[in-house]
Amino acid sequence: MELVVLNTSGKETGRNVSLDEAIFGIEPNQHAVYLEVKQYLAAQRQGTHKSKERNEISGSTRKLKKQKGSGSARYGSIKSPIFRGGGRIFGPKPRDYRFKLNKALKRLAKKSVLSQKMRDNSIKVLEAFNFDAPKTKEFITLNNALGFEGKKSLYILPEANKNVYLSSRNLAKVKVLTYNEISSYDLVHAGEIIFLEGAIEKFQENLRK
């Protein structure tokens, strides 16, 4: 399996890169993808929610009326959950929503997303490029030349590049990450995935471990 390397003008360079069938050509496992995306989103939750229960409410503990003979419910305290301002029954408490997944499943999830993206023809390989200084206008020109105007694009770099990152930071539909920062959520969320030529082999090597 091969992909043509494009230049920054969106033209073919005449070079190809080899893609591993075991990464880009498998039958997608949707449940594995679901689990890793769920794990990613769960880890974003702060879990700081809290409501007061009956024993935490400030208020009188005087019994409101006698136990029997009133013909209505037996009220013990103004802090009861049935009154406005009372405690909350089974309210939320601070908690950590994170959970673990094994590495093999996480690798399977990435392979599944990449295989589906290959079927959809949504993966491109771009020759290495750099900017002399952060220039959003130059990045927009590059993105439009590749035909990704108005599309969610994920650029995967072989190593951190401050100028490229800063040039893309203000673009709502563009994300730039290095090959070892990628999650299945990033791959699913992207409409188009663009590997820089030096990143594709490093990324594949990571998934073979």
Image (tube, helix red, strand yellow):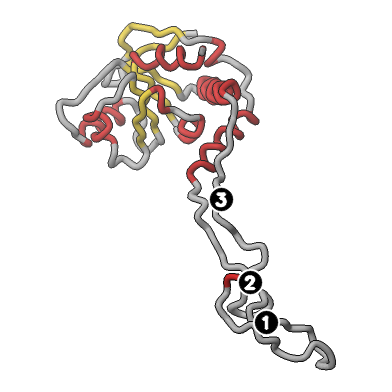
Q: Is residue 46 above or below residue 200?
A: below
Q: Which mark is residue 54?
A: 2
Q: Are marks 1 and 2 in contact (CB under 8 Å)?
A: yes
Dot 1 amino acid type: Ser
Secondary structure at badge 2 equals helix
The residue wearing badge 1 is: 77
Q: Is residue 39 above or below residue 62?
A: above
Residue at the (50%, 16%) spot, across then down: 207
Q: Residues within 10 Å of mark 1 (few under 14, many from 20)?
A: some
Residue at the (31%, 21%) spot, across then down: 159
Q: Earlier in the sequence, mark 3 or mark 1?
A: 1
Dot 3 amino acid type: Arg
Q: In the picture provided, is 32 more to the left or to the right than 46?
A: right
Foreground disc of the pair 3, 1 = 1
Q: Are marks 2 and 3 in contact (CB under 8 Å)?
A: no
Q: Which mark is residue 95?
A: 3
Q: Earlier in the sequence, mark 2 or mark 3?
A: 2
Q: Are marks 3 and 1 in contact (CB under 8 Å)?
A: no
Residue at the (15%, 26%) spot, across then down: 132
Q: Can residue 150 be seen in the rendering of this structure? A: yes
